[in-house]
Amino acid sequence: MIMPWSCCQPSAIPAGMKTIRGFTLIELLITLVLIGILAGLGLPALANLMRNNQITAQTSALAMSLAAARSEAIKRRENISVNARGGDWSTGWTITDSAGNQLRDHNIAAPVTIVETGGATSVTYQSDGLTTAAGFLNFNITHGDCTANPARVVRVSPTGSVSIINNGC
């Protein structure tokens, strides 16, 4: 059976009803402009968040490495050292036992720098958990984009305890 051609033709749209055709070009441009403005407002906050996370990660890594070295010294009843790689804390550090065997290794990400204010290139914990340093050791942690200098300070007391001072950024 062949169907008449009139069955396949579009029916007339009743008066007063509009057809939906999608977005107009102006609506699309306004939406894109609003998205651009919101993204522009959010990018500086995202950059601050990333910088703060990099600083916090390296600060925590150093503090945890120092605490781990102290714990190992007490557990093994021998001296354990945290040594700056190549004499520069900003390139990373290793944890070694009294025989020089490497126990742990840590690398540093480029934009974060770590400097021990007294110039010490190692921290040695004795079997009782005390450091061999005569006084406090202060590790200044900075970021190239940070206005607060230093952003964080990791402080090691002669008793071996580790504390973190937050200077902002």
Image: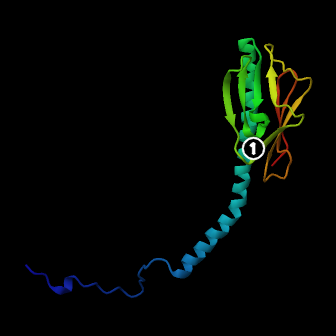
Q: Quadrant of residue 4?
A: bottom left
Mark 1, other Cα within 10 Å: few <14 / some 14–19 / many ≥20: many
* SS of the residue under disc 1: helix
Q: Is residue 107 left or right of residue 144?
A: left
Residue at point 92% right, 25% down? 135
* Nearer to the camera, 139 or 81: 81
Residue at point 31% right, 87% down? 12
Q: Could you say where residue 49 lies in the image, as x and y percent from the top left?
A: 71, 51
Residue at point 41% right, 81% down? 19
Q: Could you say where residue 166 lies in the image, as x and y percent from the top left?
A: 83, 41
**Disc 1: which residue:** 55
Indicate whether 93 appears above or below 161: below
Residue sitting farthest toward the right: 135
Indicate whether 44 appears above or below 114: below
Q: Is residue 139 left or right of residue 7?
A: right
Q: Could you say where residue 138 lies in the image, as x and y percent from the top left?
A: 87, 34
Indicate the amino acid at tag 1: Ile
* Nearer to the camera, 30 or 56: 56
Q: Could you say where residue 16 lies in the image, as x and y percent from the top left?
A: 42, 86
Residue at point 76% right, 29% down? 83
Q: Is residue 115 left or right of residue 34?
A: right
* Nearer to the camera, 85 or 6: 85
Total marks drawn? 1
Residue sitting farthest toward the top: 77
Q: Is residue 20 left or right of residue 36?
A: left
Residue sitting farthest toward the left: 1
Indicate whether 81 appears above or below 154: above
Q: Quadrant of residue 86?
A: top right
